[in-house]
Image (spheres, grey):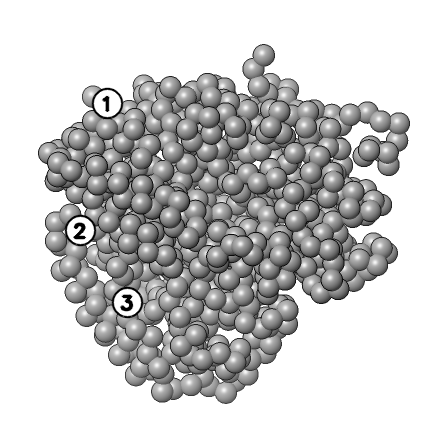
Amino acid sequence: MSQHEQEDMRSQLDEATERRVHHSVPGHSDHGPLHHHTPLHPSDEGYPAEVLAKMQADAADLISRYPQKRSALLPLLHLVQSIDGYITGRGVQFCAEQLDLSTAEVSGVATFYTQYKRHPNGEYTVGVCTNTLCAVMGGDQIFDEVSDHLGIGHDETTEDGSITLERVECNAACDYAPVVMVNWEFFDDQTPDSTKKLVDDLRDGKDVVPTRGASKVCSFKQVSRVLAGFTDGRADEGVGAGPASLEGVKVAAKNGWTAPAAPTTSDDEGAEK
Amino acid sequence: MSTELTPILSKFWDHPQSWTLETYEANDGYKALRKALDQPAADLVDMAKGSGLRGRGGAGFPTGLKWGFLPPPDGGPRYLVINADESEPGTCKDVPLMMAAPHFLIEGMIITSYAIGCEHAFIYVRGEVVHVYRRLMKAVEEAYAAGYLGKDIMGTGLNLDITVHSGAGAYICGEETALLDSLEGRRGQPRLKPPFPAVAGLYARPTVVNNVESIASVPPIVLNGKDWFTGMGTEKSQGFGFFSLSGHVTRPGQYEAPLGITLRELLDMAGGIREGHQLKFWTPGGSSTPIFTDEHLDVPLDFDSVAAAGSMLGTRALQIFDETTSVVRAVSRWTDFYAHESCGKCTPCREGTFWLKQIMERLEAGRGSQDDIDKLVDICDNILGRSFCALGDGATSPITSAVQYFREEFEAGMHTPASELFPPQRSTLFAKETLSA
């Protein structure tokens, strides 16, 4: 770990302590817009030459996918996280150089999006959905129990660096509530016990299998590389649809319901008037 | 006669390899493309208009009309951008569609690109669903390998590239102009309209932004004809769509049905409200649509009927809550969401959602003051119609509708915490056996 990262970790710890105190104020939740974040530090230390060469090649590939190169900024920030595990100062510098932007422009974008981390992330982000529907169905209780179990709050990381716990917003799986995401893979129909076992397995280094997703949860850095735009060959793993996605199909099959047939016409080519 | 389900996009989701090109082609996949390429592009725009297809992303704007708004070709690029940033609370249809059958979207994009004269199309998918991203990348790869994408598609001289782009966690990027800014590598903040994207969209070029489900519906419409599509649904809300049931319902899930089906019919199919409980309130189309109650079980879920009853069809995201649920708690959490996701560009939304959040927190904790309800309604009145984009409007919907139907629960928030009136454990799915009383 570089000196810079150590410093960053330390400031993160201080911040976490501060936040816990802050949150002990009755009625104050950590769900608000006033996030308290570690600033993006400029790094003194650049990337090692061979890492940089690979990143430059990847960046060139990403930039070539867009008519204007600035469009590659979000992918490049995911790429930085795939190397550094969060958005580092050197990563901001790298993006700025690749895209002819200022570091301020890159930081301005990086700080807008919640998936870009401002401090070292755990190997696994465990995100408990606490938007209304999941919260009511049990997400709040899951978050509270897992938080107690791990001894960390929202946007905090376990001391061993394995897990960052988050409250996440609606992740488009409401028919599987309560939902937990691990590194952006779906864990459907969770309970406090199932989620505690999940985090224990992750900390024990066991392979953990999403409900709908790849055949195992990959690390934060690996997933960041996929999100940057580089496939990992896992698209064919896992199910096509989970049980809730198929409820309508099952009801239709049971009742013999199908979509109406196309109106009959003399020939296929003439079907459109 | 009661409404029947119409599995079209979900028809073969139960196939063990439903997402592959092979499965898609075995289910009429890419036949519509062949048929489309045999027609003049302008006929496809007319077909889309004639089908009555309205945008499936929430606003319900007629899809064909959107295509038709593009100015005449000037030799420069024109873009198609798919809004796959599905993030509206309760909405969970595009993600399973892209995971189970991504080729519907890819084929729809190729047809649409031909119709509007686009040679580079984009899918902006939210970053928080990595497996969906994998499936989309794979589907695009397969389509290139099969000659459906790239140069000289199927010998027609048409060219099309598709770039799959991952967002990074921002609800506001579902707003089409914020999405375009984000796709250009900027903070995802909405743009002032006009100019509309049709005139100056991505890179200030003519651009069509359409929802996943809208474009995935294009191949079946092309294949079966617009009359087939207009034969389903109601007079002004034609065709089919996903109805996503979630919450306190026996079998939550995706139910693909003609527009105009009712919640009562859907609940019948889904096994009703969870056993021993009754419907209290629900959203017809996500958290940004005013809530409904058990009075609205028979409202036809089409654009006009839902609007006439005081809400919006939105994304057909039916979040169902039973009598154990505190309305104040539910609304308070949605308000947290809007405050968290407000992009900060305009004052009414940035400040207003933050004020609303503080008042909702007080009410939920049972520490509300006499004038809090009036203040909530007043702030909502000052956000609605005065913010830069629909996020601000959406933030007011749950509050004003909940006050309208459940004012007494807000009044109780002046003295009693919501958690006392409605113990949260009773609402959870897993604690019911310990609290049978």
**Contact (Cβ within 8 Å) of mark 1 with mark 2:** no
Instruction: Quickly name the residue at label 2.
Output: A28
Rendering quarter of residue B187: bottom left
Amino acid type, callout 2: His
Cα gap from disc 2 to disc 3, whole angstroms: 18 Å
Q: Which residue is mark 1?
A: B436
Counting from the top left corner in percent of width and height, residue B143 is at 72, 54
Residue ID at (59%, 29%): B237
Q: Chain of mark 3?
A: A
Instruction: Determine whether the residue tagged by mark 2 lies in a helix, strand or loop.
Output: loop
Q: Nearer the viewer, residue A149 or B318?
A: B318
Q: Is residue B173 left or right of residue B196?
A: left
Q: Amino acid at mark 3?
A: His
Task: Mark 1 vs mark 3: tell me if same chain.
Answer: no
Q: Say which of A92 and B375 sits in front.
A: B375
- Which numbered tag is attached to residue A37? 3
Q: Secondary structure under badge 3?
A: loop
Rendering coords of residue B302 (x, y %): 53, 28
Quarter of the rendering containing residue A231? bottom right
Which of marks 3 and 2 precedes in the sequence?
Answer: 2
Mark 1 is surrounded, within 10 Å at the Cα level, by few (under 14), some (14 to 19) or many (20 or more) other residues, namely: few
